[in-house]
Image: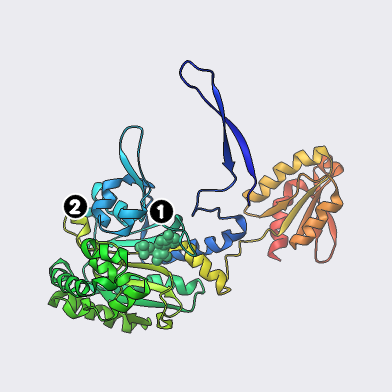
């Protein structure tokens, strides 16, 4: 249990003496949120590097968006019948009375920005990527946090299924390059508003006939978002869903051709995928292609937490107030990627290590060493130091432990003479060098 500290707070009551109340200060963040400590950063760094490299290779440009948006952007964009909007948003009113929410995902905000900033006139497709935290007030459990991080890409203005395939290729490549080798891709098509209307009716009458077998949430979903029942993890709902009508059997000609094209492109790319008729994704805005990437195969019978997912949302730009523009995107859950990397023993990022250690002895030398450190760093030479230590022995011990190639020793005498001792660690040889020439000398030796 974390230690509790006690702080004192003063509340002033009208015309009475101030009352002192004690309030517990919990040494922990709010539930479902956590620190990402330095020891885990190499994994996060690796996720960021690999993802951003893929984004730039595929022509995506970075965009940063506010963490807060007006709440109705999400209720309009994501849909009022979704779990996210119904139950999981962190929403509040500001002092000025504005109703705002912490973003539960990026797409709605990104579409808002796309329309607001006139990106509709840019050459198509407009390709953007983002990276940052999202917030959902869900029950925390393994792989499910209230604050979590997403990397995602969105492309506007292209209807061709080749873009859908390319997005899956990109998400797949990132997962693979992170060393997660056991991933699998699920795809489905949930049609467009035209064919989905008919499919939705079929689905509702099917689930109506099985109503008593559904969980409480799905009984509610029958009214609000019947397609979401297909996605429910409750055993009894999974059973009922197995015989439910499938969207791919009820696509209009255009959606069927689009889906067929996508599958052909995926075959061409040799990406292993399965068609999952129960994959619907939670949000209202999806049309045609939906996909998810899982760690491990789904044939195990259990659907594990998805590493990422996405889909087409051809109606959203118009819904939010822009021109009718086809669009598609995906998001990868960075927390889950990191978790999977650790589980499978995947490599994390190894930052460049310093090859030079700068040791100092005596107060004058200590002062001089600050400048020497800067000169070396400016020349692109990574230098380690332990300026706080007084003893040369303990500094050299650190240099040894770091495995540097060269140690520079700046003693009182050298500082006065304008020299520095250069020690080659492998051979143990030492030389006195003119301090003004130390940068060139170090460069020369490191090259060797
Ligand atoms: P979604 O669009 O909701 O499927 O989210 C995309 C990805 O973000 C998911 O596949 C997860 O990897 C990740 N994700 C979503 N919600 C959470 C959460 N509460 N905690 C951690 N990761 C999440």
Determine whether the residue tagged by mark 2 lies in a helix, strand or loop: loop
Of residues 157 and 134, the one nearer the viewer is 134
Tell whether 59 sits left or right of 386.
Answer: left
- Give the residue at x 80% y 62%: 425
Residue lying furthest front in this view? 212
Please tell me in which quarter of the rendered image ligand 1 is found.
Answer: bottom left
Q: Is residue 371 above or below residue 63?
A: above
Picture quadrant where residue 294 is located: bottom left
Q: Residue 224 carries which label?
A: none
Q: Position of residue 203 (x, y in %)?
A: 19, 73
Residue with the mark numbered 1 = 137
From the viewer's perspective, tell me whether residue 315 is left or right of residue 358: left
Q: Position of residue 387 (x, y in %)?
A: 76, 45
Q: Name the residue under label 2.
A: 322
Looking at the image, is mark 2 or mark 1 nearer the viewer? 1
- Find residue 401 and report its horizontal and vertical position in percent: 77, 61
> Is residue 390 shown above or below 354?
above
Residue at image point 38% right, 50% down? 64
Q: Nearer the viewer, residue 48 or 333?
A: 333
Name the foreground residue: 443 vs 90: 90
- Using a 10 Å C-alpha cutoff, classify the residue at mark 1 as few (fewer than 14 neighbours), some (14 to 19) or many (20 or more): some
**Quick check: can you spot residue 312?**
no
Where is residue 147, by image quadrant?
Answer: bottom left
Dot placed on the residue nearer the N-terminal end, 2 or 1 = 1
In the rendered view of the protein, which quadrant contains the C terminus? bottom right
Residue 19 lies, in percent from the top left, at: 55, 24
- Which residue: 59% across, 60% down? 40
Q: Which of 309 and 405 is in front in this view?
A: 309
Left or right of 437 on screen, residue 209: left
Decide if residue 67 is in sight here.
Answer: yes
């Amino acid at each position: 249990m974390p230690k509790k500290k006690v702080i004192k707070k003063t509340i002033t009551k009208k015309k009475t003496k101030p009352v002192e109340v004690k309030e517990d200060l919990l040494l922990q963040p709010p539930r479902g949120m956590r620190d990402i400590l330095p020891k885990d950063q190499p994994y996060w760094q690796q996720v960021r590097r690999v993802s951003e490299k893929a984004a730039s290779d595929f022509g995506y440009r970075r965009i940063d968006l506010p963490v807060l948006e007006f709440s109705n952007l999400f209720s309009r964009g994501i849909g009022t019948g979704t779990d996210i909007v119904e139950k999981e948003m962190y929403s509040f009113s500001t002092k000025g009375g504005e109703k705002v929410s912490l973003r539960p995902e990026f797409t709605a905000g990104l579409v808002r920005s796309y329309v607001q900033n006139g990106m509709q006139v840019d050459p198509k497709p407009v390709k953007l990527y983002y990276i940052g935290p999202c917030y959902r007030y869900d029950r925390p459990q393994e792989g499910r946090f209230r604050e979590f991080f997403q990397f995602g890409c969105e492309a506007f203005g292209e209807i061709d299924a080749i873009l859908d395939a390319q997005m899956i290729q990109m998400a797949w490549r990132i997962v693979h390059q992170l060393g997660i080798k056991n991933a699998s891709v699920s795809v489905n098509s949930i049609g467009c508003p035209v064919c989905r209307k008919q499919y939705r009716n079929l689905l509702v009458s099917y689930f109506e006939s099985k109503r008593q077998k559904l969980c409480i949430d799905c009984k509610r979903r029958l009214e609000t978002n019947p397609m979401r029942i297909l996605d429910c993890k409750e055993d009894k709902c999974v059973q009922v869903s197995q015989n439910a009508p499938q969207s791919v059997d009820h696509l209009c000609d255009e959606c069927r051709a689009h889906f067929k094209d996508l599958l052909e492109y995926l075959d061409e790319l040799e990406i292993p995928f399965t068609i999952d008729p129960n994959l619907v994704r939670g949000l209202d805005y999806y049309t045609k292609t939906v996909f998810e990437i899982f760690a491990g195969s789904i044939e195990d019978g259990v659907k594990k937490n998805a590493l990422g997912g996405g889909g087409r949302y051809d109606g959203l730009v118009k819904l939010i107030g822009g021109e009718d523009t086809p669009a598609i995107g995906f998001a990868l859950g960075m927390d889950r990627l990191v978790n999977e990397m650790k589980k499978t023993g995947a490599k994390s990022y190894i930052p460049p290590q310093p090859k030079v250690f700068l040791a100092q002895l005596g107060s004058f030398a200590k002062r001089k060493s600050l400048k020497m450190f800067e000169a070396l760093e400016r020349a692109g030479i990574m230098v380690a130091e332990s300026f706080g230590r007084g003893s040369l022995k303990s500094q050299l011990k650190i240099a040894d432990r770091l495995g540097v190639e060269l140690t520079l020793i700046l003693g009182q005498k050298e500082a006065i003479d304008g020299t520095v001792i250069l020690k080659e660690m492998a051979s143990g040889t030492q030389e006195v060098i003119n301090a003004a020439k130390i940068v060139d000398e170090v460069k020369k030796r490191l090259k060797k």
